Amino acid sequence: MSIKGQVAVITGGTGSLGSVVTARFVRAGARVAVTYRNPAEWEALQAVLAEPEQVLGLQCDVGVEAQVEAAFAHVQEKLGAPQVLLNLAGGYEAGAPVAKLEESLWDHMLSLNLKTTFLCCKHALKYMLPASYGRIVNVSSKIAVDLPAKAAAAAVAKAGVSALTRCLAQEIKGTGVSVVAIMPSVIDSPAMREMAPKANFDRWVKREEIAEALC
């Protein structure tokens, strides 16, 4: 599928994975909007893009519905109706067994990974369904299948993303809008290398590989 000229919303588009995907979509000729919370990350992304003016920045907490709704309305106004949604916003924290897992971390993982995906799907569909066209890609994780110890909050959140994707796929069957989830294993990033400095990085999924698959 060619994405040239299509309007793509990339949540977390200034993050470690998101910045690589955003750059790939810009090179492919898409009209891209990215969400971000940290202005420094937005500035850093603009600095590495060959044509930063092609990307619309949306300072937005994608875990807050009013902000998500406003962000999609802004995309519609500036670029046109969103045709592609990549839900890349998310995160991973682990290390505590369930018996010692803080409620705040549980809530954080579900909000950061699952609630954000739900809200962005919901508001993207308001534009995609009337147009009978749209492509949504959600990011689950292999931990949703492996279910490792001391990672319950992250694993449950990513399993929720997979379940949400399957339910949504059934709901929108035949509408011209599609939704899929990818389930990468460990993504090679500076943060993950710092977290596991003795790991075999060669076995990790490269961000560029994900970008190519999504594009």
Image (cartoon, rainbow, N blue to C red):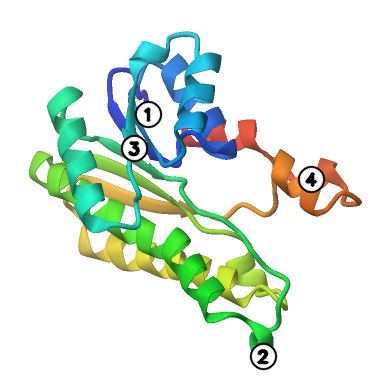
**Where does label 3 land, which residue?**
59
Q: Earlier in the sequence, mark 2 or mark 3?
A: 3
Report x, y in % for residue 49: 50, 15
> Looking at the image, which residue is at 28% across and 25% down?
6
Report x, y in % for residue 212: 55, 30
The mark closer to the camera, 3 or 4, is 3
The mark closer to the camera, 1 or 2, is 2
> Looking at the image, which residue is at 24% across and 35% down?
83
**Where does label 1 land, which residue?**
1
Q: Specify whether 110 is left or right of 48.
A: left
Q: Foreground residue, 115 or 82? A: 115
Q: Earlier in the sequence, mark 3 or mark 4?
A: 3
Q: Helix or strand or loop: what does disc 4 sit on?
A: helix
**Looking at numbered disc 3 in the image, what kind of residue is underneath it?**
Gln
Q: Is residue 153 visible?
A: yes
The answer to whether 16 is drawn above or below residue 28 in the figure is below
The answer to whether 114 is drawn above or below residue 72 in the figure is below
The mark closer to the camera, 3 or 1, is 3
Report x, y in % for residue 74: 18, 33
**Looking at numbered disc 1 in the image, what kind of residue is underneath it?**
Met
Report x, y in % for residue 12: 45, 42
